[in-house]
Image (cartoon, rainbow, N blue to C red):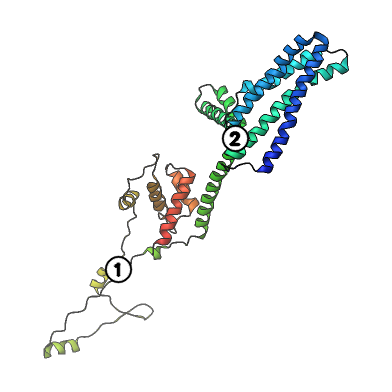
Amino acid sequence: MSAGRTLTRAQKLVLTAAFVPMVATGAAGGAGTFSNIRGAYGSGTALGAVAAGEGATAVLALVLLGLTMLGQASPAVVRIGLWLLPAAAAVMAAMAAEGAGRTVIYAVTPMGMCVAAEGMAFLARRIVVHTDGRDAEAEHRAATVVRSLAYHRARAANHPDEKIRARSERTSWRLARKVGTGDASLGTRLLDVQRERVTDGADAALADMFATPVTAERHAVTVPVTPSLPPDAEPQSASTSAAVETDPVTVSRDGEDTQVSPVPSDVEEAAGTVAVTPVTLDEVAAVTGVPTPHPGEALSDDQLVVVLRHLRYSDDPPLSYRQAVTAFRDAGFVGGEQRVRKAWGAVMSQEESTP
């Protein structure tokens, strides 16, 4: 809500014109009540009745108007008195009337002060909201609802009596419908929170949809192998050369008469499969420089990133967001949905920035 705004000249004129008939209505109601009761009980009694009815109502109206202009919430007894006192004056005037027609007229006359007081208080409240940017009445009601909601949620969760827990559960749901009602400032803040959650959810969903799959070949480390060169040939004597030339070369063939070249034994020993040891969560945490995450414990943001990165690359192809979250919950790790989504976004950002 905007604050610090001032009333324009046109607004001041319209509001002043609206206050005038309200004051006139209240004064006419008091004068009418005085006239009606004076005809039945005399001037002294009529004056006392007007003072107890319309006069007390006018005092409460001024209190309500002053509190509203000061930006404070009015007590409940003031609001109740604005209706009870004119109602009492209406009953008193109705008893002094003769006939059904006069009874109705005498009973309705004191209510003019009640309507005038409520109208002036409501208009003054709107002026304060426009100029100061806050509604004290709405804030008071919202605070009352939130306090009651917090109490009933706590009682529904921890009270030893099952019936009381169920009753508080139903009450808390009824109170939840009133949160933010009539409070524009609170409604705006709730919308901001909801927009942030929707933005985080959309970011995680888009990252999960459009992330490039990382294959094992992308992370494979190629170790260059330099073949060893044979030693320089030593000068051969004539006898050795002759021996080499005369030695027969035996060529083996398989059953289909295909020539099979013999493989030297040293080549067979050199050829082998390199075993890849899976990286543990402790090793990932040690490399990142954070304490090792453990299931069931509260994790920091960095620990959440470590756990999700480890789970994502624990299988080939890497896990998607939903698969990683399922593995995260199955492993017993604890973390809110919003924090997990943010940590997943960090994992995706690091993955995209890594050449």
Q: Picture coordinates of residue 219 (x, y %)?
A: 38, 63
Quarter of the rendering containing residue 238: bottom left
Task: Reply above or below: 177 against 225.
Answer: above
Q: How far apart are the two marked residues, 1 and 2, measured between alpha carbons?
A: 71 Å
Q: Which residue is mark 2?
A: 135
Q: Which residue is mark 1?
A: 223
Q: Residue at x 29, y 66 (%)?
A: 272
Q: Is residue 319 left or right of residue 175?
A: left
Q: Quadrant of the C terminus?
A: bottom left
Q: Is residue 210 left or right of residue 88?
A: left
Q: Is residue 223 left or right of residue 342?
A: left
Q: Picture coordinates of residue 102 (x, y %)?
A: 86, 17
Task: Reply above or below: 220 against 37.
Answer: below
Task: Reply above or below: 179 against 75.
Answer: below
Tell which of 31 and 154 is nearer to you. 31
Tell which of 257 and 37 is nearer to you. 37
The secondary element bearing badge 1 is classed as loop
Quarter of the rendering containing residue 271: bottom left
The secondary element bearing badge 2 is classed as loop
Q: Amino acid at mark 2?
A: Asp
